[in-house]
Image (spheres, rainbow, N blue to C red):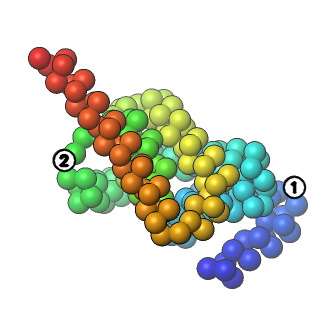
Amino acid sequence: MENFNDSIQSLIEGAGWLAPALFIVIHLLRPLLFLPVIVVCIAGGVFFGFVEGAVLSFIGLSLMSFFFYKLVNIFPKFREGVARLKQKVFQDRRITVSQVMILRVMPFIHFHLLSLYLMEMTKTLKGYMYYSALGVILPAVLYTAFGQAITEFSWYAAGLFMIILLVVYAFLGRIHQMNIESSNG
């Protein structure tokens, strides 16, 4: 992994003024390279600094969401595969947009699985891109700014961070459930 990071660094440094575009392309190729979102966003912070790295990560993640939307509509087998993964991971659980946004911050939750949830909730490209763009702001900023610190947490600090995110996720689910019950009753 260290050799891969060194080769990306030399590629970006050698790209000069094309480096930002190259970084966005790396975001688009990230799923094919099996790279987690956090790794690419951390690299953005290292290579471009916090502000430019976060902006470039936001652009790259937003474009990836757009291409995912187009791909699942062009290739129904791809959509079926992601839907099967969704069924395995979440069964028939319904989640809210705010819960999707919280789950996007968790490093090991499948990015495109959450995109499928957003597609099912919104039904239009415009609505999907609105919520998808909102949903990638927090990971782009957090991972770019604090990604290196998160990966260097001790196991108990990382566990505490995950527990806090799970509590927020459960709390949002409870609020959503109470809203449904109050509107039905």
Instruction: State the residue at coordinates (31%, 43%).
Output: 170
Above/below status of 82 relative to 176:
below
| Res 97 → quadrant | top left
Image coordinates for residue 122, horizontal then vertical, percent: 37, 32
Which kind of residue does numbered mark 2 sit on? Answer: Asp
Instruction: State the residue at coordinates (26%, 35%).
Output: 174
Alpha carbon separation for disc pair 2 and 1: 47 Å
Instruction: Write down the residue under mark 1.
Output: 17
Which kind of residue does numbered mark 1 sit on? Answer: Trp
Task: Confirm whether residue 155 shows in the render.
Answer: yes
Q: Quadrant of the N terminus?
A: bottom right
70 to the left or right of 141: left
Identify which residue, 29 or 139, lies in the foreground.
Answer: 139
Q: Secondary structure at mark 2?
A: loop
Q: Quadrant of the C terminus?
A: top left
Q: Secondary structure at mark 1?
A: helix
24 to the left or right of 153: right
Image coordinates for residue 54, horizontal then vertical, percent: 69, 47
Above/below status of 59 relative to 134:
below
Image coordinates for residue 50, horizontal then vertical, percent: 74, 50
Instruction: Write down the residue under mark 2.
Output: 92
